[in-house]
Amino acid sequence: MIQAFHRFLLLAAASCVVSLAAPPAAVAIGVDRPLPDPALEARARAIHKQLRCLVCQNQSIDDSNADLARDLRVLVRERISLGDSDAEVLDFVVDRYGDWVLLDPPLNVRTFALWLGPAALLLLGAGFAIAVFRPQRRSPEPASDALTPEERARVKALLERDGDAS
Amino acid sequence: MRLSYVLPLALFAVVAVALGIGLTLNPRLIPSALIDKPVPDFSLPPIDGRPDGLAAADLRTGEVAIVNVFASWCGPCRIEHPLLMEVARSGEVPVHGINYKDLPRNAMAWLKRYGDPYRRVGSDRNGRVSIDWGIYGVPETFVVDRRGRIAFKHVGPMMPEDMHQRILPLVRELQDR
């Protein structure tokens, strides 16, 4: 019974995850341990926080327990201790996994729609709203409320006519 | 005047269709950064007990090749394995393997049990070379062109239609070039 349940779990795990079952824990690129130099370790941690975990997708590799995230943490520390600049380390990872791994993606040809799309849609919507809801002016309104001489004359004529009738 | 009523509707339709298509995409498929780039420089030893490791030079021989990343602990690898066996038997295109984070004896037992479709297999014990290939899950399968450039990558187990409708046609196209 228990064995059957284990088998079920195994199957369920195998079918819902595109693999990434934990490989034998003994093999890893290195040990996931902070660098002895606190300044370098702080830089490494800052980079870890900028890199998206490829397995869990919405976590940074700093947060993730995934095996690949651990390997990438170790790699980042390794590059930093070899003297790479932060930008070089990020480039190293982006070269392999693309802009996708950056939690803050850069603005470039492939991502311009991501960055500018919402603003463009908002502007477009605002433009249409203004065009549609602005009060319609079918005829030009008079410049002021004061009567023009012609109107004054007409009012006078009407009043005089009314005066005659009564 | 009529335009200001039709245009928002048309825009809405465009956005709705674009987002609708977005919903059908699989967010787990991350586009490879290595398409059209040369295979990374690497050299992997063979699995203990098997001849022929795999190195970048083996993929620059002027031959189109399939490179499959697998492991004995990977369940989905078993699903696609018969397809690789079929391709290997046909001899149409060489299939090479990268054995990801595997113990040699497990890998050898697995190949013995399910068949060994690979011409060369590099053993990537610590997964370092696989990171150079941009691998984030097993199985993954690459098509490498004559010049040793990565032409295509498939993530996850290949289904028969992936092999017969995408990968093999691409292999033939690259072979004819």
Image: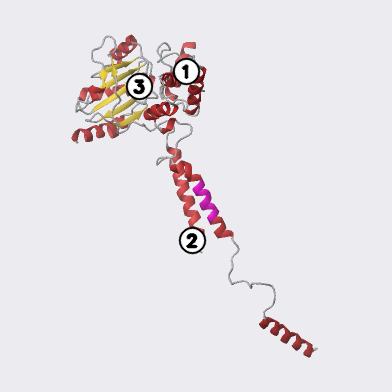
Q: CA distance from mark 1 to mark 3?
A: 28 Å
* Residue at figure coordinates x 48%, y 61% from the top left: B3
Give percent across and percent down for residue B72. Answer: 35, 15
Looking at the image, is mark 2 or mark 3 nearer the viewer?
3
Residue designated by label 2: B3
Return the chain for callout 3.
B
Amino acid type assigned to the residue bearing label 1 in the image: Leu
Amino acid type assigned to the residue bearing label 3 in the image: Ser
Residue closest to the eye, B149 or B109: B149
As helix, strand or loop, the secondary structure at mark 1 comes to helix
Q: Is residue B10 magenta?
A: no
Return the chain for callout 1.
A
Dividing the picture into quadrants, the one containing residue B105 is: top left
Farthest right residue in view: A166
Quadrant where the C terminus of chain A is found in the figure: bottom right
Q: Which region of the structure is painted magenta?
A: A119-127
User: Would you call the spot at circle 1 few (<14 residues within 10 Å), some (14-19), or many (20 or more)?
Assistant: few
Residue designated by label 3: B130
